[in-house]
Image (spheres, helix red, strand yellow):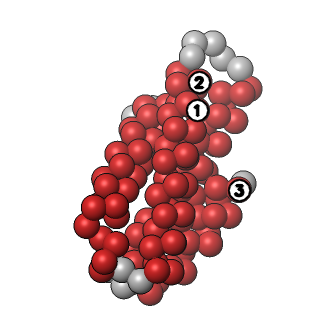
């Protein structure tokens, strides 16, 4: 599968999951979760939404015809951002919803990948 198509797919998946979690958080979760976990969940959803749009835009730019050195830069940027967003956001999601302690330990690695 082409990297561009994978970026579009994962960007769409991140956006879709962020919308679902935002709706669940607003309409059914607030009474069942601690305030500090709710704040962390809001941050993860926000990053997931913003990065989903950015990943899709990177995928669209990478699909453009023509060869240039920037295509490989777009591929690497998209892959690092996608991997970092998944580790960061889903680390927070799993640590909050399933109380998986290991998940909260991979969150900083995701943040580093998003920065790079």
Is 57 left or right of 70, judged from the image as shown?
A: left
Please provide percent x and percent y for residue 87: 51, 64
On residue 61, the disc is: 2
Q: CA distance from mark 3 to mark 1?
A: 16 Å
Q: Residues within 10 Å of mark 2 (few under 14, many from 20)?
A: some
Q: Element under label 3?
A: helix
Tags 1 and 2 in contact by the CB under 8 Å rule? Answer: yes
Read off the residue under disc 3.
115
Give the number of callouts.
3
Q: 83 or 32, which is in the foreground?
A: 32
Q: CA distance from mark 2 to mark 3?
A: 20 Å
Read off the residue under disc 1.
58
Q: Element under label 2?
A: helix
Is 30 left or right of 43, judged from the image as shown?
A: left
Q: Is residue 23 visible?
A: yes
Q: What is the quadrant of residue 67 in the picture? A: top right
Of the two numbered discs 3 and 1 on the same chain, state the one appearing first in sequence. Answer: 1
Residue at image position (44%, 34%) is: 8
Tags 2 and 3 in contact by the CB under 8 Å rule? Answer: no
Q: Is residue 95 visible?
A: no
Q: Residue furthest left?
A: 28
Residue at image position (48%, 38%) is: 7
Q: Element under label 1?
A: helix
Please provide percent x and percent y for residue 25: 34, 64
Of the two numbered discs 2 and 3 on the same chain, state the one appearing first in sequence. Answer: 2
Residue at image position (55%, 72%) is: 107
């Amino acid at each position: 599968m082409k990297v561009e198509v994978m970026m579009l797919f994962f960007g769409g998946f991140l956006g879709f999951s962020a919308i679902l979690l935002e709706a669940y958080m607003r309409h059914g979760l607030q009474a069942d979760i601690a305030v500090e976990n709710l704040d962390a969940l809001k941050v993860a959803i926000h990053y997931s939404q913003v990065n989903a749009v950015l990943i899709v835009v990177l995928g669209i730019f990478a699909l453009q015809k023509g060869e240039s050195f920037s295509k490989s830069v777009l591929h690497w940027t998209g892959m690092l951002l996608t991997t970092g967003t998944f580790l960061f956001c889903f680390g927070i999601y799993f640590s909050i919803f399933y109380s998986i302690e290991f998940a909260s330990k991979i969150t900083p690695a995701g943040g580093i990948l998003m920065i790079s």
